[in-house]
Image (spheres, grey):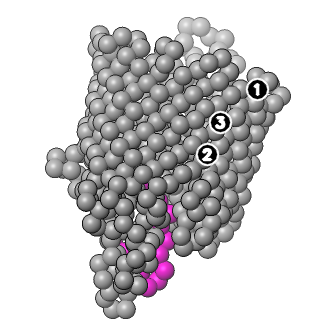
Amino acid sequence: MPNSRLFKFCLGLIVIMFLSRVSFGEEARKDDDGLSRNLYSRLQDEGFTGFLRTDYFSSDKASSEKTDFLGLTAQIKILPRLSDKIDSRFEARAYNFDILHYNNDNSASELLEGLAIFRFENSDLSVGKQIITWGRADGVNPTDNLSPKNYTLLLPEEGDRKTGVTSLKYDYYFSPELTATFFYTPFFEPNKVPFAFPSFIQPSEKKPAYNIENSEAAFRVNKIGSDLDWSVSYFNGFDLTPEVRYLGTYGGKRLIEISNHRIQVFGADFAKNYGRYGFRGEAAYMLTEDMDGIYPYIKNPNLYGVIGGDRTFIETLNINLQFIGRYIFKYSDVEKIQNQAERSIYIKNATFSGELDEIQYSMSGRVDYKLFNETLDIETFGVWNFNRNDYFIRPIVRYAFTDSWKGTIGGEYYEGDENRTFFGFLKKNNTVFMELKYGF
């Protein structure tokens, strides 16, 4: 279905649900025999939910010079029960992030999830497009390598970034607390990242083909519901974050190739609470295609870890602090590359891949304060890199006018050297945003 048709379908369906709920909802709820229930009530039985939201961003997230984006997003989710032992889940989104300028480049639709879940006595088999999240750290998850994120999406919430990957997931339950998970897919999808290149650089993308040779597999054992929650995991697939390779010059342009390389990740995490204190940690050891550190366009093997905790004060104030570290094995300084054109490309590549320094130290923090019976939520999240003194701050305020209507206002601020730091590289994405959302 073309993007415009799916967008109109989602928007039209939401309008129908809204009118149906407002005009006929009370009469329908009074009828217990189910014969005269309205369309909204019938869909509710199938787990139908959704929302319509309008957003304003003062800047895009593609590291461009463009400003002032007004968008409209429609999203629906339905959970049909196909039989006593088969559930399903479907979620779709349609959006236009530049309705003021009628820009079709910022209009799209996507199926976030579409899968069937087969229930067995001690296990579940999920088949289809699904979002899978691993890791217990807050906002920084070294073991989360399965589902891609869209970092250019003009929506305010962190959870909006993820989309599903067509895959098979098998969960075996040894007990209510202990689960083993197997994941498999031949359909790799990378993260969408805010790469922006000047006119003298000509990029090309090399994406792994959908075939058995490029399959990804992962395994995880997860323990929950006890004093100590933990998991251990293994992933063999492609790095979600693309890397850039310099190919030379042609016709006065520098040619580069954007690609994703295969990695193996051994991971573990834990979480434990002591009263109002919570402690968590997560670590991953990554093996790459460049174990000897020879190629500047492929990540080196590395060890990446997060450890921290949070405390709740006065019931509704939560403060979370985490320390983040990464060690690059076989480190080589790309700033020593002799060719100027090649060096500039690989400095950007190392900046985005987190390989500018052999040892990196960072800290993240989140302060969340809820007021007025939790209808008002004030939150600030930030990350500061010690090595190069660059940082990112994301304040956001949410207010629930009613159960259905919610408003959001916030911003994202990046600071650092534009040529030598990760957050400085993203300075063009500094933005203020606002959202009004109707959900049902």
Q: Position of residue 151 (x, y in %)?
A: 51, 55
Q: Amino acid at mark 3?
A: Asn
Above or below 414: residue 65: below
Q: Position of residue 359 (x, y in %)?
A: 46, 55
| Residue of label 1 | 313
Residues marked 1 and 3 touching at CB (< 8 Å): no
Between 205 and 282, the one lying in front of the other is: 282
User: Does label 1 or label 3 sit earlier along the sequence?
Assistant: 1
| Picture quarter with the C terminus | top right
Between 130 and 331, the one lying in front of the other is: 331
Q: CA distance from mark 3 to mark 2?
A: 8 Å
Query: In this rendering, would 440 be left or right of 89?
Result: right
User: What is the number of the mark on residue 320?
Assistant: 3
| Residue of label 2 | 364
Above or below 433: residue 158: above
User: Does label 3 or label 2 sit earlier along the sequence?
Assistant: 3
Q: Which residues are magenta?
A: 190-204
Residue drawn at point x = 51 percent, y = 26 percent: 271
